[in-house]
Structures are given as C-alpha cells and as structure tokens.
Image: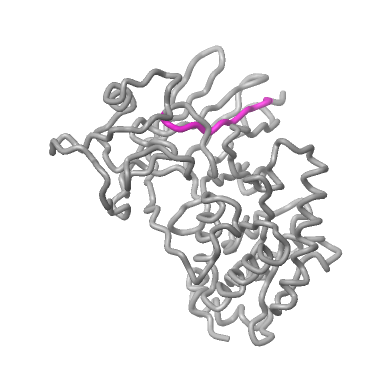
Amino acid sequence: MDCLANIKFLDAFGQPMNGLAHQLWEGSKLISEYVTTARGESVWIRHPEGTTIDVRVRSEAFAEYKSKVKIKLKGLKSIFIISYPNFMLQELNFLTAYHAKKRFLLAQFKANMVNEIKKLNSLSSKSLNPNFKIQQNRTTTAVVKEQTVDKTDINAVIKLRVKRFTSKYQKQLLNWEAQSLTIQNVGKLIPQACGGEKHYKRALERIAELHPVYQPYVIKLINMGYQGLGICWTIKDSYRSPDAQDALTGGVTNAGPLQSYHQYGLAIDIVSVRNGEIVNYDSRLKRQSRQDQAIADQTLLAPIGESLGLIWGGRWKKPFDPPHFELHPNGKTWRELKPQLLKLGVTNYKKLQF
C-alpha cells in the first residue's frame, strides 16, 4: 500500500521557511531536491508504507546536504511538519533588532522563547511582524539595541522538532547543529543583479563554494547578464560532492562522480529571477510557463557566458542542460584534473592547480 506524504518546513512561529535547500532520500536514491519559498509550498511524495525517508538540509558552512531527520511513512496519507525550536526566529535581523524580509537567521540569545518574545512585544498569534525587543541571555540584564553583533557566535545546538499527524499523534526531538551564517561578498557582485537580498546572499554563498579561479567569471556572468539583458540571476547549484553527483538519476546528468566539473568547483547552475522570485519556482506561473521562461532567459545569457570562455550546457543534446556553465581552465578536462584531485583529497578542490 502506498502512502501519500506531505512534508512542510516551518519556523518557530509556524511560518514557512524561505530559501531552505533540502533533499529527500530513500536509501541511496535521491527522490526530491527543493528550495522552499516564502509562499509555503510543501513537498508531496508517494511511496510504499513503511518507507524510511531521510531529510537532508544544505549546510551553510560546508556546502553539502547533511541528514537531519528520518521519517517513516505510515497510513494512506500523512502530514509531516519539520519545525525549528522556539529560539530560532525567521527573518529577524539581530544587528539592529528589527524584523525585515530577509533570509532566516538563528537567534543568538537561546534564553528567549517564542512566548517570551510575544510577551515582551505584546504580540498575538496573528501579529508577528512588528519591531521586536530582544532580551539578552538571563546572565545579563541589558536589552539589545542597535549595535554590532558577532554572528560567528551563532553556533548553538538547536533542536529540530518533527511532528507526524496521523490517528495517533507522535513527536520526535533531534539535535541539529547550527552553522555560522557569516557571508562575505566576493569581488564586486552587483546586489541588484540578483533581484533581491535573499537571492544576492544565495549567489554569494554559491560563489564562495567555487574554485577561486572560477569565481570572477561567475561574478562577471551575473553582472553582465543583468546590465546587458535587464534580467536578474542567482545560482541554484555550484560545488557538488562526489556522493551528491552519484545520487543524481532520471536523466538529470550523464556524468558520474568526479566526471562533472561541479566536483572541481568549476561549474554552476544559474537561474533567472523575475518579480522577486526564481522563475523555476514561481508558483504564480504554470509549470510549463516557468520552464519555457527559464530556458528562454538562459538562452539569452549563453552568448555572454561563451564570450567569457565558458562552456554552456544548452548546447548539449543529452542531457540538455541550459542552466549549466562550466570553465575548463587552460583547456584542462576533468580527466586531467581527476588524478590531482584524488591526490589532494576531494574536499580540497580549491587547491587544484591549472
């Protein structure tokens, strides 16, 4: 018997997590890869009852997907809500202690629970967007005002709460180690070229994962694509580990582990941003319209990428891969780079010499 499962990702206030990259695995098989949006879209899967699904979330620090929780499918239909603890607040800027439409951040002050913050600010359940007063850890009495906060201290161990709603309510608590969210700009990427702060930060993160030789090419590609075409861009994927490459199936790629330039930090998958949303994920458009618009945008970007010396995946027939741009530094192929990478260790791809 198959189970229809709906998996949702919520923050401490029960609001949808925005920009959370996650994967669903059944054993060694990747069955879903998704980035959550502000509109609260959730993931639906249908698999046999008893199947164990491994939920993996992309690590900010190591650019890899790490297992966070495993859920077991049961019944004809189940809803799984994966939510963060009370001391994680979505879109709260602790540098100035105000609420803004920004990517989610971890609360530094673990003593503050949701109910405490509601009480401090006279918030109701339906009133979650005013300016917040943030009380510091109980070891001090000061209140956070506009000041500089070292976000590298946000390495708390938080708890991931998983609720499963069936005829019998069940709850599971697991530990999730939070990573630092410090993000550095690389080069001179134009923020407006990414179509919004969350897409800009996403692009910075993905660029930072690349080999240093390739980073300036990607910055130029995004900037020139914005200035020349009037289209905004961000990066869906950059570095991909050999294990993640091995898991890709279903015609997504013909390249096995260490056969893709993603494993060498020399490839990206780039997506267009229109009206503040990544075109591929814009629920305001029909699925086919999203796909057609995304490919049209990437086709316009192709001559710019090729003028920079990049290889465009849209010229390949199997698989046709229009988001993909890769660099062959000094004409080096992955076959020539592979022995060097194995000698360095696959995680030391940034040390490759060309």
For residue 322, which quarter of the picture? bottom right
Front residue of 173 and 154: 154
* Coordinates of residue 101 in the picture (x, y in percent): 48, 40
Q: Position of residue 316 (x, y in %)?
A: 83, 67
Q: Residue at x 55, y 59 (%)?
A: 203
What's the colour scheme? one colour
| Observer-nearest of 316 and 118 | 118
The residue that appears at 61% across and 43% down in the rendered structure is: 25
Check the image and name the residue furthest to the right.
Answer: 317
Q: Is residue 6 magenta?
A: yes
Task: Pick out the residue farthest to the top.
Answer: 167
Residue 258 included in the magenta stretch of the image: no
**Residue extent of the magenta highlight:** 3-12
- Residue 65 falls left or right of residue 96: right
Location of the C terminus (image quadrant): bottom right
Say how many tags the image has. 0
Residue at image position (68%, 33%) is: 45
Magenta span: helix, strand or loop, mainly? strand
Q: Quadrant of the N terminus?
A: top right
Viewed as shown, does residue 344 lie left or right of 77? Answer: left
317 over 136 or under it: above or below: below
Q: Is residue 289 above or below residue 323?
A: above
Q: Give residue 318's position: percent from left, percent from top.
A: 84, 63
Q: Nearer the viewer, residue 60 or 70?
A: 60
User: Which residue is at the front of the view, 62 or 325?
Assistant: 325
Image position of 120 (left or right of 188) = left
Residue 290, position in %: x, y?
77, 45
Residue lying at 67% horizontally and 31% vertically, measured from the top left = 44
